[in-house]
Image: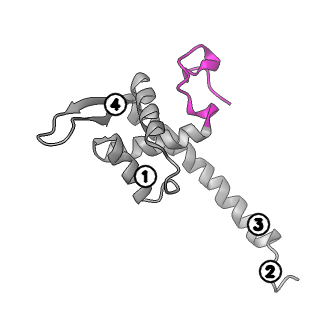
Amino acid sequence: MCDSDCGCERHGGEGRCHRHRPERGWLQLLFLRLIHEKPVHGYQLMEELNGRGFVQPDRLEAGTVYTILRRMEQHGLVSSEWEEKASGPDRRVYTVTPDGEELLRQGIEAMLLRKVLIDELSAYYDSHLRRTADKE
């Protein structure tokens, strides 16, 4: 359940709460995590996501990446500046804002709590429910 201070549409805010759209929240947290490491441009972000195996190859289109980045910037989670290139086109480089860092921290903390639950359920499954050659 969403808390009343999240600023989501449900509470009259701007719709930035990732709790109501988990798939968007996962991508948003991955974007924040990579941008938090170092400022990146959109194409570089796509390469990092694919190269690290965070998304299935060719499943994330450039239009989706840039749309999410624009929304994140509108909601104050990232900021961008144009980087002028001596050769090639200029590109927009993104950095995480303090609000983005806080959302990243909260999102990871929420996932860590879920991980504890998943680990406990997995252990229960292994010891009580898994069918093995020995139990059959």
Which label was assigned to residue 132?
Answer: 2
Gap between marks 3 and 2 measured at Cα: 12 Å
Which label was assigned to residue 125?
Answer: 3
Q: Secondary structure at mark 2?
A: loop
Quarter of the image where the N terminus is located: top right
Spot the residue most to the front: 88
Residue pictured at 48% horizontal, 55% vertical: 54
Q: Nearer the viewer, residue 79 or 85?
A: 85
Amino acid under disc 4: Thr
Residue 136 image offset from top left, x and y in percent:
88, 83
Residue 27 image offset from top left, x and y in percent:
50, 42
Which label was assigned to residue 49?
Answer: 1
Sequence order check, earlier mark of 3 and 2 = 3
Amino acid under disc 2: Thr
Q: Where does label 4 land, which residue?
A: 97
Gap between marks 3 and 1 measured at Cα: 32 Å
Q: Is residue 69 above or below residue 60?
A: above
Q: Nearer the viewer, mark 3 or mark 1?
A: 1
Sequence order check, earlier mark of 1 and 4 = 1
Amino acid under disc 1: Leu
Query: Is residue 7 a member of the stretch shown in magenta?
Result: yes
Q: Which residues are magenta?
A: 1-21
Q: Secondary structure at mark 1?
A: helix
Q: Nearer the viewer, residue 67 or 105?
A: 67
Residue 68 image offset from top left, x and y in percent:
46, 33
Do the numbered discs 1 and 4 sit on residues whose CB atoms are within 8 Å? no
User: 115 left or right of 52?
Assistant: right
